[in-house]
Image: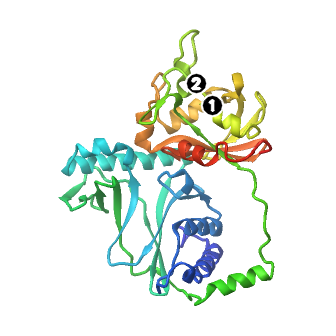
Amino acid sequence: MILDSGYKENVEVYFSYLKAICALSRLFSDSSQPYLYYRVAENIFCKAFEAENLSRADLAYDARKDNLGIGLKTFVEKVTNTEKIAEFNALSGQLRELQDKSLALKLAELRNERIEFANRTYGIENGIYHCISRGEKSLRIFETSYDLVDLINIGNVKNTRAGISFEDGRNEYSFNSSKTTLFKKFTIPEDAIKIAIEIFEDPLDLIVQFFNQQLFAAKEIPCLDFVILPLYSLRDSKPDHKIVAPQSGLNQWNASGRKRDFGEVYIPIPTEIRKNFPNFFPSRDVPFKLHIPTGEILNAKVCQDNSKALMTNPNNALADWLLRKVLKLKEGELLTYERLELLGIDSVRIRKIDNNNFKIDFSKLDSYEKFGSLNFCMVDRTNC
């Protein structure tokens, strides 16, 4: 747990951040319940506890502190708080064919696989949910265990208006079929920490004072510090049917011709990335450090004609981490798009720390397309 594990100074800072941001609630709502946008709550938590923010990766956890995975939840206080914990939009067709306990079991398997995938990716050994409930001019904060679904003890499966509900002896879950979303029930404990919140009646005046006192200096918008790379083939894929190329990219080891090592793989760098961000990566064959989510560092470089491949040195370091450890593929087993769909990811996010250091993380389904629609050919980025 975070709240009772020796982070007293961090907790005090955390509470002060929450009080400050919730005091501005009148900017967004007339309710006497504090307004706290979930992205703001994530950023506040990570800043106060010096935790790594994982929320943009859209995996099972929102943050990581050392080897602890943390799911962050904020919700309006009710008798029963049922919150979203997973979406399976890409698998809606498969799930529609199931019902009753077979559906509950499939949902549990999918949920567990995504948790275990995140554990492998980030080296997480334990997990918690950190919850903020917003009540009448107050917050109640508590933590609870982040459990795998107990497949053996799934029971009390019931049909509901929206889908089904079920239990596993530790937690209660529900599934909305039309939204293909899994929910979990959160119960506020009696010993939850309660914080009184003072909501300013006119916070806008206070913000204007800050600007007039020049407490905030305008900053030039920086060049984009990250790109998204697809793990599938843009050439072979169609909008409604994506494919991981069977003989290139992360399946390069399976290419015809000369005999190849099972670790011979690369992450494709699409033409649009190279065209719109020509100076994002170092030049071809110039080595740099690639920081993976566990904190380990791989030696990497951009290779092949037109700098179209991100590879590691030795080449099998990328395969050992991504294919073997994280995706759990055996030597000689092809990576398929269906495997990526099960995990809810199909791209990686590469963040530029400096010219010699880059950080890689996973991105959810369709991230590359969304990134492209926002960034390709929008501005002149020749200096980025």
> In the rendered image, which residue does mark 2 sit on?
263
Residue beneath the point at 32% across and 78% down: 79
Label 2 amino acid?
A: Gly
Q: Which mark is residue 257?
A: none
Q: Position of residue 190 (x, y in %)?
A: 39, 81
The vertical placement of 246 against 206, above or below, is: above
Identify which amino acid the numbered label 1 is placed on: Ala
Of the 4 image quadrants, the one containing the C terminus is: top right
Q: Which residue is mark 1?
A: 317
Relative placement, left or right, of 281 versus 98 is right
Q: Residue at x 52, y 37 (%)?
A: 325
Identify the residue shown where x is 78% and y is 77%: 215
- Residue pictured at 54% horizontal, 16% vertical: 255
- Kindly state the secondary structure of the residue where label 2 is placed: loop
92, above or below 302, in the image: below
On screen, residue 312 versus residue 250, left or right, reads: right
